[in-house]
Image (cartoon, helix red, strand yellow):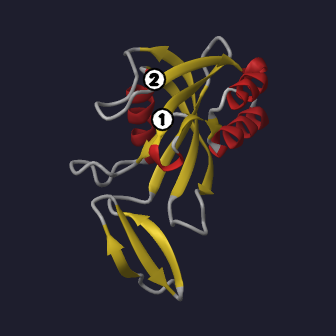
Amino acid sequence: MAQPATVIAETKHLRLVQRNGWSFVQRTSTNRVACVIAQTPSGKVLLIEQYRRPVDATVIELPAGLVGDLGDQPNETIEHGAARELFEETGYVAGQWRQLANLASCPGLTDEETTMLLATELRKDGPGGGDENENIVVHEVPIEKVDGWLAKAAIDGKMIDGRVYAGLYLLRTVS
C-alpha cells in the first residue's frame, strides 16, 4: 500500500508531491481521464486538433477530458465524462460505449489514469469545438486512410498525442 504523498507545491490545477523519495505531479481535481475512440457509421475516426501550451504546438488528439473534475459532479462515471467530452469537443453523441483499456498516462511523472473507450453508433447533435477556453478543430478521417493522414499532419509540424496510436491499435484489435 502506498504511503501518503507530501505536497511540495500547489497551484489552482496542479500539485507537486513526493512519496517514498519520488516527486511527481497530481491534478488538484481528479486523476481520471476518459479518452474516446469515436467511430462513425461510415467508417471514420474522429480526431481533434488544438494548440497545447505545455508543448507549444498544435496537437492531434482523440476526444478526451478529465472525469469528476466539475464541482457539481465529483462522482461522475467514466462513461458520463466520456460522453460529455465527446459532445463538447466534437458535437457527436454515441449510442454504444465499450471500455477497452485502462492506461497509465505517464507513470514517471503523474498518477493520472486514462480509460480508453470505444464510441459507436454516432450521430452529430451539436457544433463541437470545445468550451469557451478551447478552440478545437474536428477531423473525420476514414480509418483506412488515418495512418497517412497522421503522417502528413506530423510532416506539417503538428504533434500527435500518443493516445491516438494506442486508440487506433485498440480499434483495430476489436474490429
Instruction: Measure the C-alpha gap from mark 2 to mark 1.
Output: 16 Å
Image quadrant containing the C terminus: top right
* Up/down of 99 relative to 60, above or below: below
- Mark 2 vs mark 1: give the one in front: 1
Query: Which residue does the image show at 32% across and 31% down from the upper left?
Result: 131
Q: Does 112 sit left or right of 106 as displayed?
A: left
Q: Position of residue 135 (x, y in %)?
A: 40, 27
Of residues 55 and 25, the one nearer the viewer is 55
* Up/down of 111 relative to 42, above or below: below
Type of amino acid at the residue the image marks with label 2:
Thr
Mark 2 or mark 1, earlier in chain = 1
Q: Does 39 sit left or right of 77 as displayed?
A: right
- Residue position marked by numbered label 2 in the rendering: 90
- Local crowd size for mark 2, using a 10 Å CA cut-off: few (<14), some (14–19), many (≥20): many
Query: Which residue does the image show at 73% across and 29% down from the upper left?
Result: 155
Of residues 123 and 15, the one nearer the viewer is 15
SS under mark 1? strand
Q: Position of residue 94 (x, y in %)?
A: 49, 24
Q: Position of residue 54 (x, y in %)?
A: 48, 50
Query: Which residue does the image show at 36% across and 79% down from the upper left?
Result: 7
- Residue position marked by numbered label 1 in the rendering: 51
Type of amino acid at the residue the image marks with label 1:
Tyr
Residue 169 - label? none
The image quadrant of residue 142 is top right
Query: Which residue does the image show at 72% across and 22% down from the upper left?
Result: 149
